[in-house]
């Protein structure tokens, strides 16, 4: 029997109205010796996926970190790459991100072309994902690295049209991102407005630092929520997400 893909599992969960939650681990901000303790806490929570990646990551850091996480967890590990160097077969899947809200060709298609030689013989499940960066109150690391301006948060029609365009281009997931270290999460009205336009799963990340903010995003239409900075700043946040 074939093992269901990460994509198929998420589609099934969305169809059953199950809400998904991912922890994002940045290899450049995470110490290898802390993996065992950290993942034990993850395993006691509602977290369903582990995302690994960052805007700027040392070569081989992702591969080493993913292998270490695998030793302590059976959760699906998905690469959330900031660059081609972060691709590793140690993971289960790769979000093949295209920054469709920006105009930098490197992050629209350029980096993807660079990645092809790595992916040709890879066992990774590759999931085309539209990535939409939204203004969050300050400059984020994503904006700095990609040299792309976020979409204004007061222009929800443009945000929704951008997301829909990504779906029509064949993206399998849509990711609304406030950015790492965002001062504010994406407003509920933007999430709900975008969700109404889409027929693909909606991922939302950035700026959420409380259970109430997470629940608000779910109620607004997010299918999968990604939390990163909240755990980096305060590991007691795990206590709010216990099973």
Image (cartoon, grey):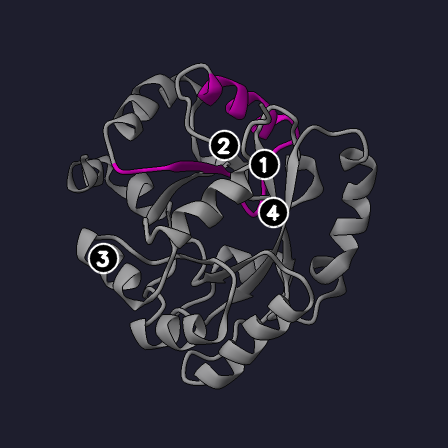
> Where is mark 4, residue-wise?
82
> Where is mark 1, residue-wise?
93
Discs 1, 2 touching: Cβ within 8 Å: yes
| In the image, residue 76 above or below residue 113 | above
The reply to whether residue 175 is visible in this rendering is: yes
Discs 4, 3 touching: Cβ within 8 Å: no
Cα separation between marks 4 and 2: 16 Å
Cα separation between marks 2 and 3: 23 Å
Nearer the camera: disc 4 or disc 2: 2
Nearer the camera: disc 4 or disc 1: 1
> Where is mark 3, residue-wise?
215
Residue located 43% across and 53% down the image: 180
Residue that sits furthest to the front in the current view: 1
Q: Earlier in the sequence, mark 4 or mark 1?
A: 4
Q: How crowded is the residue under tag 3: few (<14 C-alpha within 10 Å), some, or many (20+)? A: few
Residue located 67% across and 62% down the image: 170
């Amino acid at each position: 029997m074939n093992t269901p893909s990460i994509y198929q599992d998420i589609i099934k969960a969305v169809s059953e109205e199950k809400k998904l939650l991912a922890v994002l681990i940045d290899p450049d901000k995470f110490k290898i010796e802390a993996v065992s303790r950290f993942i034990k806490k993850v395993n006691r929570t509602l977290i369903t996926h582990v995302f690994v990646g960052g805007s700027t990551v040392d070569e081989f850091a992702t591969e080493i970190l993913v292998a270490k996480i695998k030793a302590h967890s059976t959760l699906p590990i998905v690469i959330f790459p900031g660059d081609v160097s972060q691709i590793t077969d140690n993971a289960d899947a790769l979000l093949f991100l295209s920054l469709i809200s920006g105009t930098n060709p490197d992050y629209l298609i350029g980096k993807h072309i660079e990645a092809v030689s790595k992916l040709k013989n890879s066992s990774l499940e590759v999931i085309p994902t539209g990535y939409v960066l939204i203004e969050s109150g300050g400059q984020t690391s994503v904006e700095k690295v990609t040299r792309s301006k976020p979409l204004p948060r007061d222009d929800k029609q443009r945000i929704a049209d951008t997301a829909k365009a990504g779906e029509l281009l064949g993206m399998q997931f849509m990711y609304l991102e406030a950015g790492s270290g965002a001062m504010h999460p994406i407003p509920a009205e933007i999430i709900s407005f975008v969700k109404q336009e889409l027929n693909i799963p909606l991922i939302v990340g950035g700026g959420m630092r409380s259970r109430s903010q997470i629940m608000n995003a779910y109620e607004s239409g997010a299918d999968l929520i990604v939390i990163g900075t909240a755990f980096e700043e305060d590991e007691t946040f795990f206590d709010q997400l216990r099973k």
